[in-house]
Amino acid sequence: MISEFWSWILGVVSSTGIISGIAYLLRDTIGKLFTKEIEHKFEKKFEIFKAGIRDNETELEHIRSFLVSSRKDRDAAVQLKRLEAAEILLRARNALSQLSMLVEYLKILNTDEILASSESSKIAEFIDTLIKPFDIDDKIKKFGEIDRTLPRLYLGEKVLKSFDIYENIILLAAGVMKLLSVPLENKSRFLQAGSLSKSIIEIVPKSKEGFDKFGENYAYYWVAYFYEEILRELRNEMSGTGDMDRAVESVEKLALNSRRAQVNVRTSLKNAGLSDSLIKQNENSSNTTPTDVVH
């Protein structure tokens, strides 16, 4: 029994020794085998990692292309909306311009003298003769039917401010002329000083001198300027370029309208048998076009 035990022990020791010896002798070979196995596993995992990166890059490229395409589509849609908004604003401007002659009349007429005159009925008839061809109520109604939601959403602040000022000048002139055409006493109580000057001076600071000299009525002399300013600002927004030739055309148009207004007013005064005192005596000196504003 004891001999068998020692035989087993010696066998184990011998086997362990042999194995240890073999391991010692083959240590370099075994080390290389382990190293190659580790490298193989690492390379395999690295290839999987690189494949994952390539897949991610492809996915990112797809996402990037989608975003670029979406942005182009969105920009194109916005540009179409802006063009539509510009067309609407120009249509509204043209609708208002049909009443621009009323502004020219008020630049000529001495409203203080008209309001103080005792011949209110005769003057009302005279004013009614001037405004009848314009059908003010119908034109204002058609202007009000133009939906200006898109311009407010897609156009810039400068063009919208210019349009608002132009609109206010035209509507103010229409309201004053309508009031003067009504045979009422003490009409002046309905005419309150507005704040158009503040809006105009904000955009064109040089205009302050004119308002200080001529008062709120000086706003009438800026109607042609803002008529063209709307178009200039729209051109700037759509293409980034202005149009100086339009400014010259605006001055020429204003001069023509002014001459037409003077002829109409003087002829109507003569036919109505009214005094020339209803026309501003300093009309020629105050009727100065703001041509010194250069863009």
Image (spheres, rainbow, N blue to C red):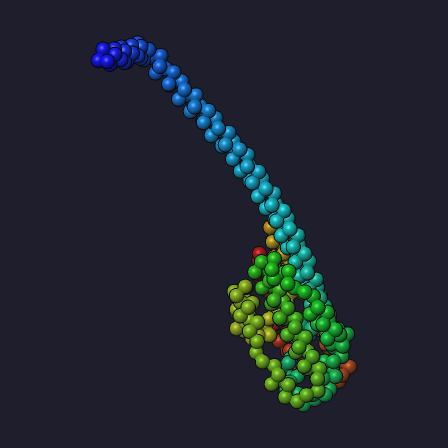
Residue at (72% x, 80% y) in the render: 127
State whether residue 245 appears in this view: no
174 or 108, which is in the foreground?
A: 174
267 or 63, which is in the foreground?
A: 63
Residue 183's quadrant in the figure? bottom right
Residue 173's quadrant in the figure? bottom right
Answer left or right for 50 relative to 272.
Answer: left
State whether residue 129 appears in this view: yes
* Residue 184: x %, y % from top left: 68, 88
* Residue 137: x %, y % from top left: 73, 75
Residue at (64% x, 68% y) in the render: 167
Residue at (69% x, 70% y) in the render: 144
Examine the rendered structure and indicate whether residue 99 appears above or below residue 82.
below
Residue at (67% x, 81% y) in the render: 179
* Residue 149: x %, y % from top left: 64, 63
* Residue 231: x %, y % from top left: 65, 58
